[in-house]
Amino acid sequence: MNLQAVIFDWAGTVVDFGSLCPVQAFQIAFQSRSIVVEPEDIHRFMGIRKWEHLQSVLMLPAVAVQWELTYHRLPNDQDVDELYKVAERALLERVAEFADLTPHAGDAVGGIRSAGLKIGSTTGYTALHMERLIPAARQRGYSPDCWVSSDQVPTGRPAPWMIFKNMESLGVYPPSQVVKVGDTLADIEEAANAGVWSVAVVESSSLNGKSISQWESMSLKAQSELSKRTAQSFSKAGAHFVIPNLAGLDEVIDQIDFRLQRGQTPPLLAKRSRY
């Protein structure tokens, strides 16, 4: 096999169906300042470093207006710092509780290992968060060969540094022989900037934003309509492959390896506007 490694995102991809832990933590942080933020406004920036994530939410017109009405001024970086402290505490308290694997993740990881591929991971979480999440995920059967957090590189997603640091640690190159699997637009942009293949997962994604119980309670029609919108967003963002869940990853891996055998590399994608 020409393919050498698969690099997974964490929340919304292999753990935490719907990527709900960050949403809860961010809502707690904003509530501490008497600001109401809708889950979809948090989900739209998921995948980037948490400080920048909070800043992006705070700059949304609906949120900035609330802030100005409450505090009679626009928010600033000091406000982001204070929100971040609250969100950080909430994440540390809860992140291990969201370590349940997404459907088919165990089988997908087992298939990758059986194929002789290495497994890396990137995340918008910090190293402190990962020190709590890693053992909890290991107990549930998931332990990648390498993980890199957003505070272990100069800049988090959409910059490629976490992927490059994974490649260095795993001893794999060139980028064309690496696949990035994620559930956010930032994951796709990170993969494009690193020159690796990108695979987007729909059902458990932060773009869908549903817990597994919410998802399973939806009608098949509602599931289909939501999945279609999410898949279109991923495709528009430039994902090379879009799959409903990780059950489809083995087939994608085979397709990518076939293309590599024919001398193909990840298509270069046009730059898109930020979310």
Image: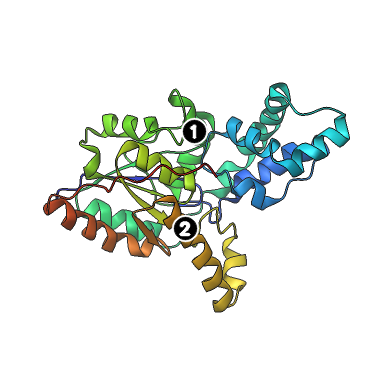
Residue named by callout 2: 102
Residue named by callout 1: 131
Q: Say which residue appears at 46% left-offset and 40% top-offset.
A: 135
Tell me which label, 1 or 2, sits earlier in the chain.
Answer: 2
Q: Say which residue appears at 12% left-offset and 53% top-offset.
A: 261
Q: How many marks?
A: 2
Residue at disc 1, secondary structure: helix
Residue 125 placement (x, y as % from top left): 52, 36
Q: What's the amino acid at mark 1?
A: Glu
User: Which is more foreground, mark 1 or mark 2?
Assistant: 2
Quarter residue 172 falls in: top left
Whether residue 69 sits left or right of residue 30 in the image: it is right
Residue at disc 2, secondary structure: loop
- Whether residue 121 appears in this view of the structure is no
Using the image, determine if residue 216 lies above or below residue 91: below
Whether residue 237 sits left or right of residue 94 in the image: it is left
Whether residue 35 sits left or right of residue 166 in the image: it is right
Q: What's the amino acid at mark 2?
A: Thr
CA separation in Å, label 1 and label 2:
20 Å
